[in-house]
Amino acid sequence: SFRRYTLTLASDDIDHSCCSLSMAKLSSKSSTQSMFRMGSCESFDLEPVVEFVMENQRLTPDIGDVYDIEKGQDLLDSRVWSPVLVMNERRWLPPYHLEDDVPDWSDTTCTNQRTKDSVELPDSSWIWINDWEVDIEATTDADGWEYAAAFGAFDQTRRRYRRGDSCRRRRWTRTRAARKPNPPRVLTNFYMVLETSTESGRTILKARSRFRVVNETSLSLSIWGLPHSQDEQFLLGSIAPAQTLCVPLLQSAISFLRLASSTSYLSEDEISESIMIIPTGFSSNRTIRTSFRCDLSLKTYHFLLHLQSERGVVDIIIRPVLTLINLLPCQLQVQ
């Protein structure tokens, strides 16, 4: 059933008369999670837009199945798939391209040709906030390829190679965002996650932003956020080892994140590079390596950031680059 809840934000930075919260259908399950959009009709929409292009390939004509590949050759080897580079030009090998085949670059339907160079900004009010990158998920291989027996067999369910597959494709994404208005407006739309649970007949609502950071390293870290223009950065908070930090709701309209060991002024080598945290799909899973130098110890620390997104809600899990697992029945000392 539909229910109406009054949500009070304890902050003097918000004009409460301009804020609105959409109604939602709350599930009768014991625990559920929903995302809402808050703001006003006069606020500036900072939500970026993700553009897609698909790269399509077939097994080369002399390979009917992956088991026909010569010993020592890898399934991911570009020589196994067509089109291939011939004189710096991508060409389908005979008997491909078939008469009714798909373009080597297409839209998500695999019917209309669409290349990375053909994707342009709508007008001067938009900017690109990253370059083209492959969309890799748990259901694709390490290079982002999904497989099928024919191009017409692709659907919304992505999967890895199965025997009999002769086609593969991968999705490239690039994100654009609206420029900051001039003069800048005070109000900004932002998203909020409501986690509902039922205990002893009572419905409990917990509100947070859609970005959550989990520190699985042995270091205390400071988390910095940047808007898509990257013209300023601000401290989101500090996070101890094995702890979780939800990005403050009023600072959640960010597109990039940086890591450091200090909460004070930082030089560029004492803070990591900017990492885009905007989801690139309804469900996405990205892993990014980054590092920064600690001024006190003069050491450079390296990290892996796992960005797991589901329906727009993003978990950012920070892990060390190297993890040792001891399966022996004794304690080990590592140097």
Image (cartoon, rainbow, N blue to C red):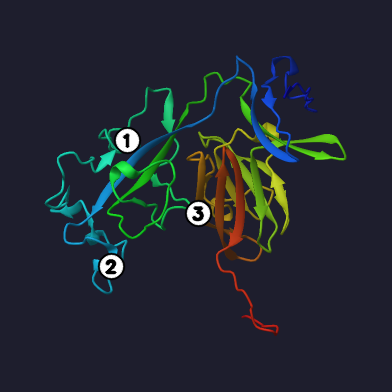
- The quarter of the picture where residue 127 lies is top left
Question: Which image quadrant: the C terminus?
Answer: bottom right
Whether residue 20 is visible to the viewer of this picture, yes or no, is yes
Name the residue tied to disc 3: 288
Q: Who's the residue at 30% across and 41% down the image?
A: 152
Foreground disc of the pair 2, 3: 2
Q: Who's the residue at 71% across and 30% down the image?
A: 26
In this rendering, is residue 213 above or below 122? below
Name the residue tied to disc 2: 67
Name the residue tied to disc 1: 107
Disc 2 to disc 1, C-alpha distance: 30 Å
Disc 2 to disc 3, C-alpha distance: 33 Å
Camera-side residue: 316 or 68? 68
Q: Secondary structure at mark 2?
A: helix
- Tell me the amino acid under the disc marked 1: Asp
- The quarter of the picture where residue 22 lies is top right
Image location of residue 262, percent across then percent down: 68, 53
Q: Earlier in the sequence, mark 2 or mark 1?
A: 2
- Tell me the amino acid under the disc marked 3: Ile
